[in-house]
């Protein structure tokens, strides 16, 4: 199975669509067999879900994600795991141990607050992909 983690400075990015990079992790028999970091394709309507689908990603972990991005991920067969925060290696370990609890609270616009406590109060909400 291949998962992706929206990444910023070695931690889960609070904003899926604005993550500067993604950590792509291949898991076999509940073990990490490969981990790589790839640059984000940029921000735009539907670009990131399509990009991740091309990598064969089946789940994506992020702090927050807009409703449109959630729907697009699901259309590509990618499960959004949301309201996650912390260092990438810790999150991977929690994923392997089935300890991540996704809270699918989509972004609702300027000033929206995620369950993780991350905010959009700096005008950073664009096109439904947090």
Image (cartoon, rainbow, N blue to C red):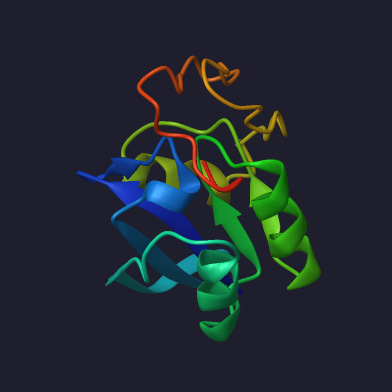
Q: 53 left or right of 130? A: right
Q: Position of residue 57 (x, y in %)?
A: 58, 73
Image quadrant occupied by the N terminus:
bottom right
Farthest residue in the left direction? 9
Frontmost residue, 69 versus 116: 69
At x 72%, y 43%, the residue is 67
114 over 80 or under it: above or below: above
Residue shown at 30% from the left, 40% from the top: 11
Of 6 and 18, nearer the camera is 18
Reply above or below: 55 against 90: below
Q: Quadrant of residue 78?
A: bottom right
Task: Give me the residue at 36% from left, 50% from top.
Answer: 19
**Measured from the top left, where is residue 114 in percent x and y?**
57, 21
Q: Is residue 127 above or below residue 76?
A: above
User: Measuring 20% from the left and 44% from the top, which residue is drawn there?
Assistant: 9
Q: How many marks?
A: 0
**129 with respect to 89 (left or right):** right
Position of 2 with respect to 23 (left or right) is: right
Q: Is 69 left, or right, of 23 in this rendering?
A: right
Q: From the top left corner, tell me how far across and down residue 72 is, in percent.
A: 72, 62
Give the image quarter of residue 101: top right
Choose between 111 and 75: the one closer to the eye.
Answer: 111
């Amino acid at each position: 199975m291949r998962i992706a983690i929206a990444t910023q400075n070695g931690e889960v990015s609070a904003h899926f669509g604005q993550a500067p990079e993604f950590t792509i992790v291949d898991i076999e028999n509940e073990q990490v067999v490969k981990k790589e970091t790839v640059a984000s394709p940029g921000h735009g309507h539907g670009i990131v879900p399509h990009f991740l689908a091309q990598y064969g990603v089946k789940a994506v972990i992020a702090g927050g994600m807009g409703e449109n991005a959630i729907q697009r991920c699901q259309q590509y067969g990618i499960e959004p795991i949301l309201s996650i925060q912390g260092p990438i290696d810790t999150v991977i370990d929690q994923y392997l141990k089935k300890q991540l609890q996704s809270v699918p609270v989509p972004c609702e616009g300027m000033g929206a607050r995620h369950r993780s406590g991350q905010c959009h109060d700096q005008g950073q909400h664009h096109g439904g992909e947090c």
